[in-house]
């Protein structure tokens, strides 16, 4: 079915507003996005002389269209999580933990090793949390580092690293939300403006080196030093009878990263004379899919001949991994579709652009305002993907107004930063929950001890966005 743009005026802002409002009220993002999408289709159907039935049909037409347009992204994320699941069950994480335990002798070195490992495992935040926690927990326990501190280091080097790593599932998700063809280049441009991610990583290394903890975290660390670091449970992956090796963790990920870069260059025509920067931005999802496939093949050649798992178990890991990515993928599909309705059908962008052009609101405040809104939304819903999925289309529409284009990159950076901050602090966030799980720390303890650190960084970020808006303007 072909769609034709119809300008519907102020009513065109109702679908995204409905999605955001329902998400904040219900704290449930899936139905909120779908209802926002369906309301947009109702507006389009009735404005173009259609019926309720045609609105229903066009809703699923739009979803199928967006799935087709982003098929490589879906394939990459599914294949990536298949590799993630295989690596996490290979025993390589435990082998790395045994090796590292012989090298690390002080609290500071163990904390720094945890932070560095968290930054190295940047492919996906969930994989990061569980892998780093499983590997480092026995070492940090031995050196009397609190489980709360371990959970914080894990959480602070998960999403904040993934959101500025070009070869992560987050980068692909963000790039897919930007309406411009060169969405990947736009994502790369936002990295210097993602103040929360950058400052959080700096904060982690400062605390690891100096040990200058404060608030509830300081009390938790004092308890751990006194030997009161309660062993909450003995959760974690099975060690496959000690068969796993460090290479089982490292090699598939290294091959994936190298082949992803080569894949993006190949797809974009780098080897045919195109410049590298243009090549990697041509179709990054296709190149990343090639890299994920290379990681998958590497894992198969490493694990099956040594019988780390049977062929049946290998395939079960793949199915399990793909199943794990379905919930965030559904958020992406719904947000793609909602953005498509707003941009392609009911003229939300035209209305917002005209409103911004005629309003007296200083555009210099835009990065600051969007950062605060994104932080509140993400904290309330517990999802950064859902938050930037809703806000990025709106931000791109606002910044398409005359004179507002210069604010696009800083405001998108503020959108991502606010989304990560809210997700970082929210007790409902899957990353927060997985960090608690990986560190084997009571969830509420992790939330309470992390909140002062994250908020201190967020306050500095808010000031930075306020200053950046006026400097750019």
Image: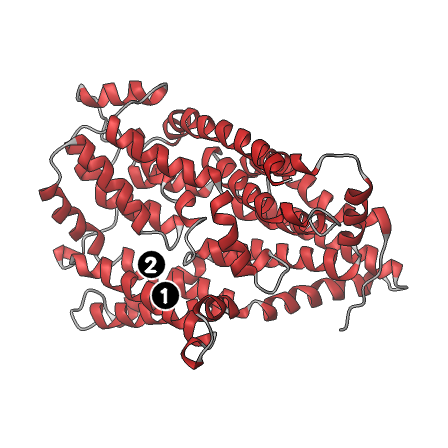
Q: Position of residue 322 (x, y in %)?
A: 43, 62
Say which mark, if any, is on residue 208: none
> Which residue is located at x 22 percent, y 66 percent?
309
Q: Are marks 2 and 1 in contact (CB under 8 Å)?
A: yes
- Residue nearest the viewer, comparing 406 with 185: 406
> Which residue is located at x 79 percent, y 44 percent?
357
Mark sitting earlier along the chain (2/1): 2
- Residue tagged by mark 2? 85
Q: Position of residue 329 (x, y in %)?
A: 52, 57
| Image quadrant where one finds the N terminus | bottom right
Q: Position of residue 348 (x, y in %)?
A: 77, 52
SS for dot 1: helix
Is 385 left, or right, of 432 in this rendering?
Answer: right
Kindly report the distance in space between the C-alpha atoms of the residues bearing marks 2 and 1. Answer: 7 Å
Compared to residue 290, the image places residue 236 above or below, namely above
Q: Position of residue 124 (x, y in %)?
A: 39, 53
- Residue 324 visible in rendering: yes
Is 80 left, or right, of 52 in this rendering?
Answer: left
SS for dot 2: helix
- Residue tagged by mark 1? 318
């Amino acid at each position: 079915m072909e769609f034709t743009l119809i300008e519907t005026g102020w009513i065109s802002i109702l679908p995204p507003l409905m999605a955001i409002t329902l998400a904040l009220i219900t704290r449930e993002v899936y139905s909120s996005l779908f209802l926002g999408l369906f309301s947009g289709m109702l507006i389009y159907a009735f404005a173009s002389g259609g019926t309720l039935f045609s609105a229903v049909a066009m809703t699923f037409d739009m979803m199928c269209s967006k799935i087709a347009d982003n098929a490589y992204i879906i394939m990459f994320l599914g294949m990536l999580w298949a590799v993630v699941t295989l690596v996490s069950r290979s025993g390589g994480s435990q082998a790395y933990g045994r090796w590292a335990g012989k090298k690390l002798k002080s609290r500071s070195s163990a904390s720094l090793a945890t932070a560095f490992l968290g930054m190295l495992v940047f492919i996906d935040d969930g994989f990061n949390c569980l892998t780093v926690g499983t590997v480092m927990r026995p070492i940090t326990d031995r050196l009397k580092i609190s489980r709360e501190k371990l959970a914080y280091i894990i959480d602070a080097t998960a999403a904040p690293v993934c959101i500025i790593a070009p070869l992560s599932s987050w980068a692909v998700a963000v790039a897919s939300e930007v309406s411009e063809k060169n969405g990947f280049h736009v994502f790369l441009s936002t990295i210097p403006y993602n103040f929360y991610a950058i400052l959080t990583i700096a904060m982690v290394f400062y605390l690891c080196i100096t040990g200058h903890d404060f608030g509830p975290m300081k009390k938790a660390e004092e308890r751990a030093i006194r030997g009161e670091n309660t062993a909450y449970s003995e959760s974690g992956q099975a060690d496959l009878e000690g068969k796993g090796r460090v290479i089982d963790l490292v090699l598939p990920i290294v091959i994936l990263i190298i082949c992803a870069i080569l894949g993006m260059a190949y797809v974009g025509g780098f080897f045919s004379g195109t410049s590298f920067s243009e090549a990697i931005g041509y179709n990054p999802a296709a190149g990343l899919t090639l890299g994920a496939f290379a990681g998958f093949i590497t894992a198969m050649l490493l694990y099956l001949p040594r019988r780390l798992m049977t062929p049946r178990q290998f395939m079960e890991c793949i199915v399990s991994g793909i199943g794990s990515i379905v919930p965030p993928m559904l958020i992406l599909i719904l947000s793609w579709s909602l953005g498509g309705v707003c941009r392609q059908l009911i003229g939300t962008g035209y209305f917002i652009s005209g409103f911004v052009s005629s309003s007296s609101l200083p555009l210099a405040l835009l990065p600051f305002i969007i950062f605060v809104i994104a932080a509140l939304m993400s904290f309330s819903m517990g999802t950064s993907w859902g938050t930037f999925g809703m806000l990025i289309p709106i931000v791109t529409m606002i910044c398409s107004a005359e004179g507002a284009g210069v604010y696009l990159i800083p405001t998108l950076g503020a959108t991502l930063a606010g989304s990560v901050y809210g997700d970082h602090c929210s007790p409902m966030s899957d990353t927060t929950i997985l960090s608690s799980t990986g560190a084997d720390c009571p969830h509420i303890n992790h939330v309470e001890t992390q909140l002062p650190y994250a908020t201190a960084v967020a306050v500095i970020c808010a000031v930075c966005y306020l200053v950046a808006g006026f400097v750019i303007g």
